[in-house]
Image (tube, grey):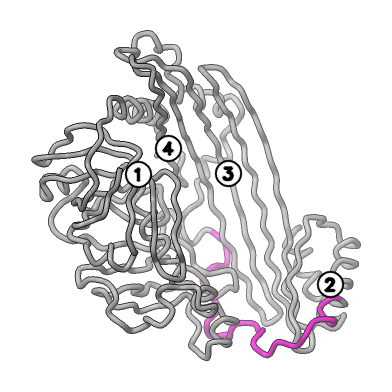
Amino acid sequence: MEIELARHCLEFALRNGATAVRITLNKTVTDLVGILNGEVDKVSHSLDRSLQIALFVDGRYGAFSSNRLEKEELEEFVRKAIGTVRMLEEDKFRRLPEAGRKVKDAMTGMEPGLYDPASSEVDEAFRRDMALKLSLWKEKEALEKGFTILGEESEYSDTVSDMVVLDSEGLFARHSETSFEIVTEYTIAAPDGRLFSGYWWDASWRLADIDPESCARKALDRTVEQMNPLGVPGGKYNVVVDSECASRLLSPVLSALGGFAVQQKNSFLADKLGEKVFPENMTLVDLPREAGRMGARLFDSEGVATREMPVIDHGVVKTFFLNTYIAGKMGMEPTVEDSTRVRLMPVGECKNGDELMAAVGEGILITGFNGGNSNSATGDFSYGIEGFFFQGGRIVHPVRELLMTGNFVSLWNELSLVADDARPCMEKQIPSLAFGSVDISA
C-alpha cells in the first residue's frame, strides 16, 4: 500500500510541474524491553513511517519529508512543496544520477541476505525472556567478590526495517533487514569506595546469533577488570587498541573522505586524492556487497549501486565519497554517497589483541575512549582513554583518566600491526590495532 502511495506521489509531482522526482519510503518497527536491577523496567513499541521526496523543478531543488501517509494530505503536501522549490535559486548541479550508475539488482529487498524470517515469530513473552537473561541480579550475592554491584541496566530490542527508493526515470530499489540488539551495563563499588562502570553489547540480523547470558557476564567482567587502576607517567607509548573501540580512530578518516567535507575544505584529506598519505601497510576496502554481513548495502540514498572498491590502498588515498551533487560542484566523477562496510586489512600474523600485546611487548591497551574531540580540518585530536598497562605481553594493571593526543595522519603512520578480530556486529570492520610512539599524558 505504501509503495503504491509513493508511486502516486511521484506521478502527481510530475503532473504538477516537477521535472524529476525521487521518493524514499522508510518503515521501521522496533520493540524493546528494558531491565533495571533484575526487574522489567521499560517496554516500548514504535512504528515509524516516512516519505521523503526530492523535487527537481525548472533547475531548482528541494527535499521534503512527511509521516502523514494519506493520499489527499500528501497531494497537498507535494503541491506546496513544488511551490516552495520554485522560489529557490537555480542550481545547475542538482540532478538525478545517470541511469548507468543506478542499482539494478535490489528488487525484493532480500538480496543482501539481512532478513531473518524468525522475526515474525518473536512475541512479547520471548522479548521479556531474552531481556531477563541479560540480568545477573539474582546472582548478585554470589558474584560479589571484592566489589559491590550497585546497579544493572539491560535492554533487548528487535527491529524490522524496510526502505524503498524510486525515481521518475524508472528506478526501483528496496532494502529490508532485521536487527536484534542486546546490551548490559553495570555500576560497581570497589572496597575503597571508588565507582566503576562498564558494559557489553552485541547485535546481529540473525536472531540465533544473540547470546544474552554471555553478554551479561562479559559486561560484568569488563567492569570488574577496571578496579584498582594505577597511574602511568606521561610520554610516548606503544598502544594496542581493542577492536571494540578501534573504529573511533578510523571514523574521522572516513569523514575526511566524505564529499561534503572535501568540497567545503573542512577535511584534512581534501587535496590528497591519489597521494600516499598513510603507511604502506594500511589498506582499507569497502565491501558493501558481502551478503549476510552487517552493513551490507546494494545502493546508497540516491539509488546508486554500491561496489567493492579500495578506499586506501597501501597508504594511497583512492576514493572520495561523492554523490551526484557534490561531484558536479567539484568537477569530479561521482562514486557513492558514503562508505558502507569498510574493512581494514590485517597486517602481520596476529589474530587478536592478546597476540598484538605479545608482539608489541609493552605499552597501553585501550579498551574505551572517554570524550574528547578532533579537528576535521587539521586532523588533530585529543581523546580521553581507559584500559590497561601491559608488560611482557601481559596485562599488569588497569589505567584510566589518561589523555591520548596527536594527529590522525601521524598516528596512522605509526601503524605497526592489524589483527583479524573485527566484531561481526559492527558495520565497519576494524580489528584490534597496534601503533608505536603515541603521546599519552596523565
Instruction: Looking at the image, tell me whether mark 1 or mark 3 is earlier in sequence order.
Output: 3
The percent position of residue 257, horizontal first and vertical second, equals: 44, 72
Q: Residues within 10 Å of mark 3 (few under 14, many from 20)?
A: some
Q: What amino acid type should be assigned to the residue bearing mark 2? A: Ala
Q: Residues within 10 Å of mark 4 (few under 14, many from 20)?
A: many
Q: Mark 2 to mark 3: distance in Å?
A: 31 Å
Q: Quadrant of the C terminus?
A: top left
Instruction: Looking at the image, tell me whether mark 2 or mark 1 is earlier in sequence order.
Output: 2
Foreground of the two, 95 or 103: 95
Tell me the SS state at disc 4.
Answer: strand
Q: What amino acid type should be assigned to the residue bearing mark 1? A: Ile
Write down the residue under mark 2.
81
Dominant secondary-structure state across the stretch colored magenta:
loop
Instruction: Return the mark for residue 201.
Output: 4
Instruction: Return the mark for residue 159.
Output: 3
Q: What amino acid type should be assigned to the residue bearing mark 3? A: Thr
Q: Which residues are magenta?
A: 84-109
